[in-house]
Each structure stands twice: as C-alpha cells, then as structure tokens.
Image (cartoon, rainbow, N blue to C red):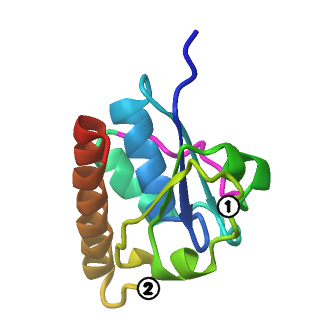
Amino acid sequence: MEKKPLVYFLCTGNSCRSQMADGFLKALGGEKYEVKSAGLEAHGLNPRAVQVMKEAGVDISRNTSDVIDPELLNRADYVITLCGHADEHCPMIANKNVTKWHWGFDDPAKATGTEDEIMEQFRTVRDSIQNRIKQFVKEGK
C-alpha cells in the first residue's frame, strides 16, 4: 500500500483554523493525504468552529486539540501554518524534504461584537479555508 503524504496543519492553539483545515482536508482529500493538526499550545476545540463546520457538512466534534508532535513534524511532507504566530514560532523541522507553507487567516476566536457578528467571522474564515483546501486538493499546492 502506497504511503499517503502527511499534511500537518499548525496554529497557535489548535482550536479553530487548524481544526477547520484538518476537517476540510480529511473530507475533501482524505483518500489522498494523511491529515493531522496541532498547535504550539492546546487551547481546546472551539465550539463555534465545530458549529460552523457542521453547517458546512463536516463533523470535527471528535477532533482533539493537540500540541505539536516532533515525530509527526519531522515526517510530514507538508507543514502548513495558518497563523502568523505559528509561522514565526514553528519548531525547527529536521526533515529537509518537507514543503512548508504559510496560509494566513484571521483568528475568528478574536472576533468581537454580537454573537451573530462573531459567527459571521467564523463563517468567513471557514469559507476561506475551504476554498484554499479545495485548491490544494486540486493542484497539490
């Protein structure tokens, strides 16, 4: 059986953006890729992220918020950071064959306003991540 390329999504807290990217890639390209996500810290799975992903037909409710695993990091084929903080503070990657990208998205967990306005921010970020994942699955970049 051929080994699937490992895509490792990284964020600061592994609660929103990396979880959404993880969910979408598993849903849209899980047959082509092994998908993992983690954070510099584990902030817990954001309930609003779970809700907006459910609206998009992707269940991430069983995902866990994890801290970066050095073993996974060093065997990843793709390391994709989703926030500037994670991009700047990503641990050293020993694997010289890794493809590292930064896909920057605003942090919906920092949104303010009414509940409707906050949820709209989550949906906007979700849709942006979904479009980027679709492009990645289609083009491999």
| Residue most extreme to the bottom | 113
Which mark is nearer the camera, 1 or 2?
Answer: 1
Q: Residue 141 shows which numbered tag? A: none
- Residue occupying the point 24% across, 43% down: 134
Tell me residue 79's x, y (percent): 53, 55
Q: Identify the disc placed on residue 110.
A: 2
Report the amino acid beneath label 1: Ile
* 64 is within the stretch colored magenta: yes
As drawn, is 24 to the left or to the right of 76? left
Can residue 50 be seen here?
no
Amino acid found under the numbered disc labelled 2: Lys
- With respect to residue 26, does 41 lie above or below? below
Q: Residue 95's spot in the image, x, y percent?
A: 66, 51
Q: Which residue is nearer to you in this view: 139 or 20?
A: 139
Classed neighbour count for the residue bearing mark 2: other residues with Cα under 10 Å, few (<14), some (14–19), many (≥20): few
| Image: 87 above or below 103 | below
Dominant secondary structure (helix, strand or loop) of the stretch shown in magenta: loop
Relative to 133, 80 lies left or right: right
Q: Over which residues does the magenta segment extend?
A: 58-66
In the picture, the quarter occupied by the N terminus is top right
Q: Is residue 122 above or below residue 69?
A: below
Label 1 – label 2 distance at C-alpha: 29 Å
> Pointer 1: what residue?
93
Q: So how many labels did they put on this image?
A: 2
Q: Secondary structure at mark 2?
A: helix
Residue 52 falls in image quadrant: bottom left
| Residue 104 visible here | yes
